């Protein structure tokens, strides 16, 4: 497992590259790699801009039936999200982009878990499996 | 090593029981020796339990191998039933046959877009004559596909709207917005040719 | 921060994004394009993203904004060369980039620009 800092715009670029490599190594198709890296970019940006900076842990995982996958855990100790349900709504047709990019990222991955509380920071864990 | 053996046997068509039985037969071989020495019974028990584990393991590996075969075949079938054909210069068509679920939509999008890049086509016709039901979910899938094709500069027409399907679409309140829809592939081709500034003339 | 070069050929501004851009660089590009459009009589902008592997919601919105900005200068923007994987991902994200024209390549993009009166 690798832990990468999210403190600058350059970090976000570095994270994209790192996640891309992990996704390719896990055997994800090109489209799935692109989806995962794009989700990582969204979440890393959120951590940076709304969370005041944080870290991401990148891990290659194996499912119970033996499939490879990549697990990303974004963590920050920022102000947290007051209304998680609201942040996660945003039908795919709206595309106004005013949200936190969370609902979009959720559609790009297979597993999505969000824990956030005002004062306790935000933790987002996503997993994408190879087919 | 046992996994390898089990997988190979699965591929050769042996049932998992046959493979497991051959593992269990080891017990019999060892039992022969134990009958001569009673103090070996505890060891024999431990050995027996270990062999049971190995036997179960061969069955699990067999299952996993079969699962993989099934999923590979399903993927093949999906691939084969989603052709993208070239109707004319710059006009391609994707006839969709069967239910349009998310898995198939992903494949349709990938193949359609790759073909757009490979042929440089400006127009794609998505034919849904072979799609049994068109509900809001299927409509969403179609809208997504058109959206993606448009990002590559292609215009899309949906053809194969049967009368019943048209009624369902309207009653469900589905809007196709500015996407042209036609009853038949022929109508869609005529529209695409018109938009390309081409005319079919009788000689 | 990298500055993306803008080429002017005739009445068209060409931008080719070759690398993985940081947010600041994209903002800078937007500013530079606005300045170029104001300073020249360019009627069209072609943004080539053939080499771009990732377009997330921020970059997507920036591209849409560049389209809107160019229209204020009576110019049209065409985004060309989007990769299939990127198009599929953007669609999943819910970004249709409506308001900006798109084309398969620079040649087709130019054809669109030249088709304007």
Image (cartoon, grey):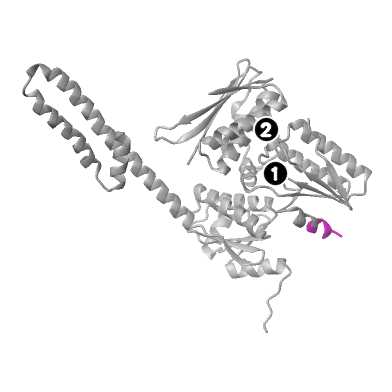
**Side (left or right) of B30 relative to B11:** left
Marks 1 and 2 belong to one chain: no
Q: How would you rate the neighbour count of disc 2 (Cα within 10 Å): few for under 14, some for 14-19, many for 20 or more?
A: some
Q: Which residue is mark 1?
A: C51
Q: Secondary structure at mark 1?
A: loop
Q: How would you rate the neighbour count of disc 1 (Cα within 10 Å): few for under 14, some for 14-19, many for 20 or more?
A: some
Residue drawn at 70 percent across, 34 percent down? A98
Numbered range of the magenta stretch: C111-117
Does residue A29 show up?
Answer: yes
Residue A63, image quadrant:
top left
Q: Quadrant of the C terminus of chain B?
A: bottom right
Residue B152 is inside the magenta segment: no
Q: B157 above or below A19? A: below
Q: CA distance from mark 1 to mark 2?
A: 28 Å
Picture coordinates of residue A59, whole percent (x, y): 52, 27
Q: Which residue is mark 2?
A: A99
Front residue of B194 and A60? A60
**Side (left or right) of A66 relative to B90:** left
**Side (left or right) of B30 relative to A122:** left
Q: Chain of mark 2?
A: A
Picture coordinates of residue B199, whole percent (x, y): 71, 74
């Amino acid at each position: 497992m690798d832990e990468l800092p999210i403190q600058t715009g350059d970090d976000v670029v570095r994270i994209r590259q790192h996640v891309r490599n992990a996704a390719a190594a896990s055997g994800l198709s090109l489209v799935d790699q692109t989806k995962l890296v794009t989700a990582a970019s969204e979440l890393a940006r959120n951590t940076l801009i709304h969370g005041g900076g944080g870290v991401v842990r990148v891990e290659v995982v194996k499912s119970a039936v033996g499939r490879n996958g990549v697990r990303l855990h974004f963590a920050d100790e920022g102000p947290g999200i007051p209304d998680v349900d609201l942040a996660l709504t945003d039908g795919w047709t709206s595309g106004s982009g005013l949200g936190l990019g969370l609902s979009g990222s959720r559609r790009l991955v297979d597993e999505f878990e969000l824990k956030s509380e005002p004062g306790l920071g935000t933790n987002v864990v996503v997993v994408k499996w190879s087919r | 090593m046992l996994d390898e053996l089990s997988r190979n046997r699965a591929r050769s068509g042996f049932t998992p029981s046959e493979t497991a039985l051959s593992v269990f037969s080891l017990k019999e071989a060892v039992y022969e020796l134990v009958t001569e020495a009673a103090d070996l019974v505890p060891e024999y028990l431990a050995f027996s339990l270990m062999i049971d584990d190995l036997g179960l393991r061969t069955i699990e590996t067999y299952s996993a191998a079969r699962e993989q075969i099934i999923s590979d075949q399903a993927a093949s079938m999906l691939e084969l039933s989603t052709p993208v054909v070239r109707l004319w210069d710059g006009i391609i068509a994707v006839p969709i046959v069967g239910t349009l679920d998310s898995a198939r939509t992903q494949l349709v999008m990938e193949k359609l877009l790759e073909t757009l890049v490979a042929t440089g086509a400006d127009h794609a016709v998505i034919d849904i004559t072979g799609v049994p039901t068109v509900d809001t979910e299927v409509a969403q899938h179609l809208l997504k596909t058109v959206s993606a094709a448009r990002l590559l500069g292609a215009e899309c027409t949906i053809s194969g709207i049967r009368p019943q399907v048209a009624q369902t679409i309207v009653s469900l309140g589905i809007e196709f917005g500015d996407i042209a829809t036609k009853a038949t592939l022929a109508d869609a081709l005529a529209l695409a040719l018109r938009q390309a500034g081409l005319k079919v003339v009788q000689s | 921060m990298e500055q993306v070069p803008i080429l002017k050929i005739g009445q068209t501004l060409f931008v080719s994004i070759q690398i993985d851009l940081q947010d600041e660089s994209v903002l800078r590009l937007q500013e530079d394009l606005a300045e170029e459009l104001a300073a020249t009589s360019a009627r069209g902008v072609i943004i080539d993203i053939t080499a771009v592997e990732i377009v997330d919601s921020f970059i997507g919105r920036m591209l849409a904004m560049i389209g809107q900005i160019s229209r204020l200068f009576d110019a049209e923007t065409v985004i060309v060369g989007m990769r299939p994987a990127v198009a599929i991902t953007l669609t999943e994200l819910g970004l249709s980039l409506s308001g900006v024209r798109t084309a398969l390549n620079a040649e087709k993009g130019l054809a669109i620009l030249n088709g304007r009166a």
